[in-house]
């Protein structure tokens, strides 16, 4: 099995626009990261050493999309950010879907909102912009290579 970011398909859809965030969008080497905000389990140990698990229902998390400073997608995200932060009517309604059909990974993130406008450094080298999002729900499926070469 071989991995390539070229196989990563990612889109953002919400009030004000819909466009690609995956391969071909001018992603930096660091690419896209998805992580959960909380642990799924909380273990409490009683005075007598007895353990009790509590299952956390939260599926919330963060998505980080890193784009080269010269990526035209920065302008699209900037416009989407500006539109969606004008009113609570437009805020927190994005959907980000990330798939890699070659290895079978699939993430559907709903209730997605921009956390802030990205830091923008002007330095010797251009670097990248990191767009951070909060997601109310992240539904992941990690695959095992559903498409095999013939």
Image: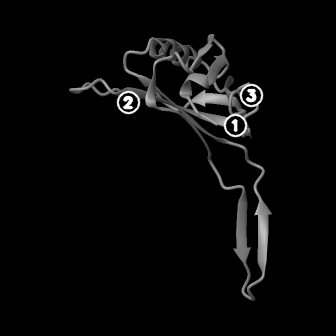
Element type at mark 3: loop
Q: Earlier in the sequence, mark 1 or mark 3?
A: 1
Residue 46 vertical placement versus 69 (above, below):
below
Side (left or right) of 146 relative to 82: right
Q: Circle 1 sits on which residue?
A: 136
Residue 121 at x, y = what percent?
30, 28
Residue 86 vertical placement versus 5 (above, below):
above
Residue 89 at x, y = what percent?
67, 19
Which scheme is used to colour this image of the protein? one colour
Q: Residue at x 63, y 22 (%)?
A: 9
Q: Say which quarter of the image contains residue 142.
A: top right
| Label 1 neighbour load within 10 Å: few <14, some 14-19, many 20+ | some
Nearest to the observer: residue 79 or residue 102: 102
Q: Residue at x 62, y 23 (%)?
A: 10
Residue 139 vertical placement versus 19 (above, below):
below
Q: Say which quarter of the image contains residue 52.
A: bottom right
Q: Which circle marks residue 14 in the picture?
A: none
Position of the C terminus by quadrant: top right
Q: Circle 2 sits on which residue?
A: 119
Q: Circle 3 sits on which residue?
A: 147
Residue 74 at x, y = what percent?
46, 17
Element type at mark 1: strand
Element type at mark 2: loop
């Amino acid at each position: 099995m071989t991995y390539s970011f070229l196989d990563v398909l990612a889109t953002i859809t919400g009030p004000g626009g819909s466009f690609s965030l995956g391969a071909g969008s001018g992603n930096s080497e660091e690419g896209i990261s998805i992580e959960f905000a909380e642990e799924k389990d909380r273990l409490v140990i009683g005075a007598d050493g007895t353990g009790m698990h509590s299952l956390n229902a939260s599926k919330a998390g963060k998505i980080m999309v890193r784009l080269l400073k010269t990526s035209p997608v920065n302008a699209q995200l900037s416009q989407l950010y500006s539109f969606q932060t004008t009113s609570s009517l437009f805020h927190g309604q994005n959907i980000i879907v990330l798939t890699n059909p070659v290895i079978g990974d699939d993430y559907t993130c709903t209730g997605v909102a921009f956390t802030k406008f990205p830091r923008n450094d002007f330095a010797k080298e251009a670097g990248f912009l990191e767009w951070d999002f909060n997601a109310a729900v992240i539904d992941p499926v990690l695959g095992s290579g559903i498409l095999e070469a013939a």
